[in-house]
Structures are given as C-alpha cells and as structure tokens.
Image (cartoon, helix red, strand yellow):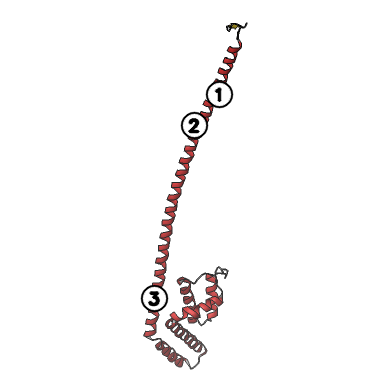
Amino acid sequence: MKVMSAVRQDAWTPEDDLMLAEVTLRHIREGSTQLSAFEEVGQRIGRTPAACGFRWNSCVRKKYDAAIQIAKAQRQKRNSRKSAALEERTGGAGAERSGKSASATEESVSIDSIIRFLRQWKQSQGELTRTIRQLEKQLQEKEEEIAKLKAENERLASEVNNVQTDYQAVNEDYKALIKIMERARKMAFLVDEDEEELKSRFKMDANGNLERIE
C-alpha cells in the first residue's frame, strides 16, 4: 500500500467519508481498534489519524449508528465462534453454552437495525450521486468556457495576421514612394545643373545683347 503524505488541508468529500465509514466498520467487525482504522484511512487519503478520528466522531459516526451496532454484533458472533472452536479443540464442556450465546447474539441483530443501515447507505449513495452530477456539470461548463476561449484566440490570431499583412503592404508602398521621391529629387537636381550650364555659356554685352562665350 502506498503511503501518502498527511498534509491535506482541503474539505472532506463524500468519497472520503464513505471510505472512513467502510474501513472503521470493518475494523469494528474484525475486533480491531478504531485507531488502527483511522491510521489506515489516513494513509489512503493523506490525512493524519487524528483528523480521521475527529471526522468520524464529529460527523460520520452519526450517519452509521445502525451499521455500528450490526458490526459490533458481528464482532461478538465472530468472537463466540472463535471461543467455541477453541473449546472444541481443547475438549471443553462449554460448547453448548457458547452455541446458545451465539444464537442470542444473532437475535440481537434486529430487522429494524438492518433497515436503518440500508436507509443510511441509500442516503449516502444519493449524496454521492448528487456530488458526481455537480462535478459533471462543472466539467461541462469548463469545457464550454475553454471552447469559447479557443474561438476567441483564433479570432484574435486572425486579426493579428490581417494587421501584419496590411503593415507589410503599407511598408512596401512607403518604400516605393521613397524611391519615386528620390528619383524626382535627382531629376530636379539635373535640371538645375542644365540651367546653370546654359546660363554660363552666354553673357550680355553693353548694348543688352547676348553673346555666346566660347
């Protein structure tokens, strides 16, 4: 059996309570101590024996009064059978008395106690079923939320992709515009040079006439 670290701080679940009840009742039937039961449960669910004992005495035990009485009766019956078997092996004369004691013990387990136990067990099963349904509903809600977030993520990713495409197109247009402006600037510079060169080839004489300079 794997021993879990007893450091849990969360609330008790119906499954934990059911395990605590089953193990404790088994220990009672077998003539063991409740402390041994608490230690076993604590190892299974990662809680201290003290926490298991407190939970049993404060909450779980009240739901299993009838089952406890049945378990005690079964323990007495078990002990009586052991005593009878021991007397038979040793040849004692008390075998008949032990048989009568066992019969009286069986009669002490009343039908009402069994009915109460079955009702309590049915109630525990109903609570467990309701808990399972609640967990299934929560799981469905989480799955729907995840689906919505996934769809939103895909939409945002598409928008980002469109923005990147638009940016690339604008960037290319901007580069093309820069090239056009650069060519226009060069062309304007060449025109200015031609005009200066043309002016420098002529000069005006004293009569106001232009004459070519060789």
Q: Is residue 56 visible?
A: yes
Toward the right, the furthest residue is 214
Give residue 132's position: percent from left, percent from top: 41, 67
Mark 3 or mark 1: whose residue is earlier in sequence = 3
**Quadrant of residue 40 in the image?**
bottom right
- Callout 2 secondary element: helix
Q: Nearer the viewer, residue 185 or 58?
A: 185
Where is mark 3, residue-wise?
A: 123
Q: Residue at x 43, y 61 (%)?
A: 139
Give the alpha-carbon distance from disc 2 to disc 1, as whole Å. Answer: 18 Å
Work out whether 155 lies above or below 118. Answer: above
Q: Is residue 37 visible?
A: no
- Callout 3 secondary element: helix
Toward the front, the furthest residue is 207
**Quadrant of residue 145 in the image?**
bottom left
Direction from residue 204 to residue 134 in the image, left or right = left
Query: Which dot marks residue 185?
Result: 1
Q: Amino acid at mark 3?
A: Gln
Where is mark 2, residue-wise?
A: 173
Question: Which of labels 2 and 1 is toward the front?
Answer: 1
Give residue 39's position: percent from left, percent from top: 55, 75
Work out whether 82 lies above or below 193. Answer: below
Q: Residue at x 53, y 26 (%)?
A: 181
| Mark 2 closeness class: few <14, some 14–19, many ≥20 residues within 10 Å | few
Quadrant, the N terminus: bottom right
Q: Amino acid at mark 2?
A: Asp
Q: Amino acid at mark 1?
A: Arg
Mark 2 or mark 1: whose residue is earlier in sequence = 2
Q: Nearer the viewer, residue 175 or 142?
A: 175
Give residue 116's position: percent from left, percent from top: 38, 82
